[in-house]
Image (spheres, helix red, strand yellow):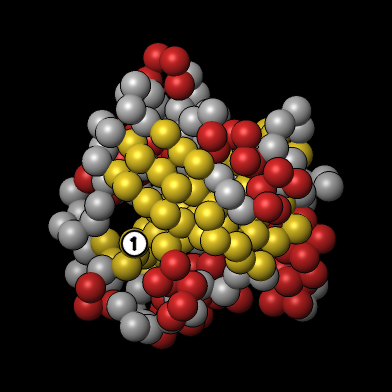
Amino acid sequence: MRSATNPIDVSHFLHLYDGPASEKNIKLSIGFDFNEYVMITRALPGKGPTYPIFRPDRSPIGLGQGYWIIGVDQNNAVALVEAARLYDLSHSNLAEHLESLKFFYADPAKHAHPDDRCICRAPTAEKITGKVAFHGDVWVRKDFRGQSLPKIMGRIVRCVSFALWAPDFAVGLAGGWSVDKGVYDPQHCEPGGSVLHLEEDHLVDDDWLLWRTGEELKNLVHHDRGELSIVPGLLPPYSSPN
């Protein structure tokens, strides 16, 4: 599938969902520098560690291969974050990429702890190949929870990911509790996506695999948007407050 646009002119594509966020007094911005993203997320009280997936010291992300979105409240304090990146699995599949730890580290032999491990039991993971967009690191500040913000952000990131990459698959990993409560809006979900232990960051997960095909993503984005129309300028790149 061919990419629809590039990081410079993606921003106005988000106009459809900037409105619902604005109604909750949240201003959205997009960024591409993951060193800056790690700096922002490390300073957020109550947010767990950012996984090595989005940390340049463990898994560098080239320009145009990843982005992040933050929302700030009326006091310019961060209220929500989410990040996404693109994997090239044309010679592999998601299950192999997870279990080899290449999903988390650019060089597992160099960066993984001897006790790090990941088991993927979700059957579909072996069929997920090609250009794969991963959406993750979702965090919403406590006073903004229960307002459907993960679903609003989910619509935003799927629009951006389609506009930037037109991937073959879009995937996420989430705890079973979030599936039970309908926190997100996945097209498909399966248990056993990632049974994970990362020693250095004290991360232990048993996540479901959330996924949709590129064709399903395209249809959903066109349904959301009416028709694909990209005009630059609405959602500004993130800049730190003075």
Q: Who's the residue at 22% across and 78% down the image?
A: 143
User: Residue lying furthest left in this view?
Assistant: 45
Please give left or right for residue 208 compared with residue 141 in the image. right
Q: Relative to residue 136, is residue 225 depicted above or below?
A: below
Q: Who's the residue at 64% across and 59% down the image?
A: 211
Observer able to see residue 15? no
Q: Nearer the viewer, residue 224 or 173?
A: 173
Residue 1, how many percent across, how many down?
Answer: 83, 47
Residue 71, how many percent across, how many down?
Answer: 36, 64
Observer able to see residue 235? yes
Q: Nearer the viewer, residue 68 or 112?
A: 112
Per the image, the residue denoted by label 1 is 139
Query: Circle 1: is it few (<14), some (14-19), or many (20+) Cα within 10 Å?
Result: many
* Quarter location, residue 93: top right
Please give left or right for residue 16 compared with residue 77 in the image. right
Q: Secondary structure at mark 1?
A: strand
- The number of numbered badges drawn on the structure is 1
* Quarter location, residue 78: bottom left
Residue 189, how many percent across, how many down?
Answer: 61, 65
Q: Who's the residue at 23% across and 73% down the image?
A: 142
Residue 70, how many percent across, how many down?
Answer: 38, 58
Please give left or right for residue 43 compared with residue 38 in the image. left
Q: Nearer the viewer, residue 131 or 233?
A: 131
* Quarter location, residue 210: bottom right
Q: Who's the residue at 66% across and 67% down the image?
A: 188
Q: Relative to residue 188, is residue 11 depicted above or below?
A: above
The amino acid on which the numbered mark 1 sits, given as a three-letter code, is Trp
Please give left or right for residue 199 compared with residue 71 in the image. left
Q: Relative to residue 115, is residue 39 depicted above or below?
A: below
